[in-house]
Amino acid sequence: MEVASSSSSPHSIRLCYVRRSGYKDSRSFSSSSLVPFCVYKGVHSAHSLYRRSILRSSSNFSSKCFFHHAKKEIPALQHRPSLKVGFNRPYCYDNLCSRNRFYRYTVVRSELADFGNSGAALPLPAHEVLAKVRGVCFYAVAAIAAIILFQLMLVAHPFVLLLDRYQRKAQHFIAKIWSTLTVAPFVRIEVQGLENLPPPDTPAVYVSNHQSFLDIYTLLTLGRSFKFISKTSIFLYPIIGWAMYLLGTIPLKRMDSRSQLKCFKRCMDLIKKGASVFFFPEGTRSRDGKLGDFKKGAFSVAAKTKVPVVPMTLIGTGKIMPAGQEGIVNSGSVKVVIHKPIEGSDAETLCNEAKNTIAKALNQG
């Protein structure tokens, strides 16, 4: 008798026992020694263990196996009416691999049987259901607010191009209203260090850690007219992508070196014109909440244009809307820590100092 490995997943199939029979005829296999669960089949050769399993599950999760020659129930299973088990014709392995054929029957049970009712669906925990409902409401509010406010952006855009082509404060003010209306009913935002922000007309390079899609909403509530850098595919999204274009968001193709060079030139041009830019130096969202390696592009722009780097730390966004699970919104609060500006002419020094500052705030929580 051999005990097989088991999986920790609640929906996985756990292998419980393995019985080998040296007989060539599968009908000589004794069913009385089986643990009362469903039967799987496999083949054992002289050198390798070949496992082949078939799970034939009905709509009510009752696992059944069928024997080719005799379709009768195992007596040991009579006390479990929800699980009817028989035998199926074994798979035969090539004669060249082994002189004797050993048929192996693997007894398995489904974790679904632990719920006591084989016909019951798996219930989701209450907090997961609530998080999904909050996510639906979050995006519903975001969509309704975006449709209404986007029309204001369209009306104001000709005047913005004439009077404030680079900073576009009016468009960012509308974006602040939109993000506040979207986030306020679901998330409480706490901001620390507002006194460290440079004056609105002072160009700077802003950098922050990146944990969630919620980071963009949170940063827009600050009302500063810095330009984000976004993938070109996002601009194709209705309303949201069009609004990003009106805000002056800088497009970037991540794997295209020409696009990266064009992006950096665009950033330096905006800074020289009095605007500010915002970078996520990690380049992508963190899946585990830990701070990743910083790329030096943002700091090279700051060093060449002689503008300060303003580090920011976002705490809590990854727990509320985890990366890769944008459809849920958990309850909680977000903290935005604005650090003192960093100045310098060496990109590597600026990068290390900014990373250490953000990492320290993350560790403190």
Image (tube, helix red, strand yellow):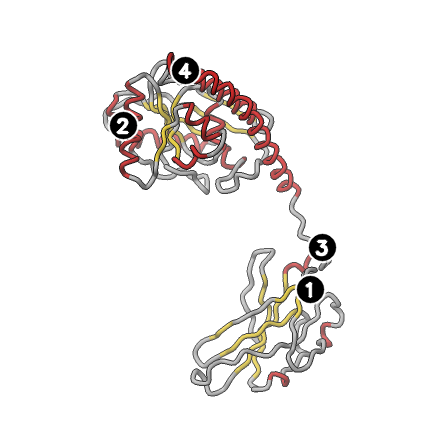
Which one is in front in this view, the residue at disc 1 or the one at disc 4?
Answer: 4
Say what amino acid the circle numbered 1 marks. Answer: Ser
- Of mark 1 and mark 4, the one earlier in the sequence is 1
Q: Which of the labelled discs sits on residue 193, or is there none?
A: none
68 vs 280: above or below: below
**How many marks are shown on the rendered structure?**
4
- Of mark 3 and mark 2, the one earlier in the sequence is 3
Q: Distance between the residues labelled 1 and 4?
A: 66 Å
Which of 333/258 is in front? Answer: 258
Which one is in front in this view, the residue at disc 1 or the one at disc 2?
Answer: 2
Identify the residue under disc 3.
120
Q: How crowded is mark 1: few (under 14 residues within 10 Å), some or many (20 or more)?
A: some
Identify the residue under disc 4.
160
Which one is in front in this view, the residue at disc 3 or the one at disc 4?
Answer: 4
Label 4 SS: helix
Q: Which of the labelled discs sits on residue 265, or is there none?
A: 2
Q: Distance between the residues labelled 4 and 2?
A: 22 Å
Which one is in front in this view, the residue at disc 3 or the one at disc 2?
Answer: 2
What residue sits 48% from the left and 40% below the top?
A: 323
Quarter of the view holding residue 345:
top left
Q: Distance between the residues labelled 1 and 2?
A: 63 Å
Q: How far apart are marks 3 and 1 (CA)?
A: 11 Å
Percent across and percent down for residue 87 are 64, 77
What residue sits 49% from the left and 28% below the top?
A: 217
Left/right of residue 30 with respect to residue 266 in the rendered view: right
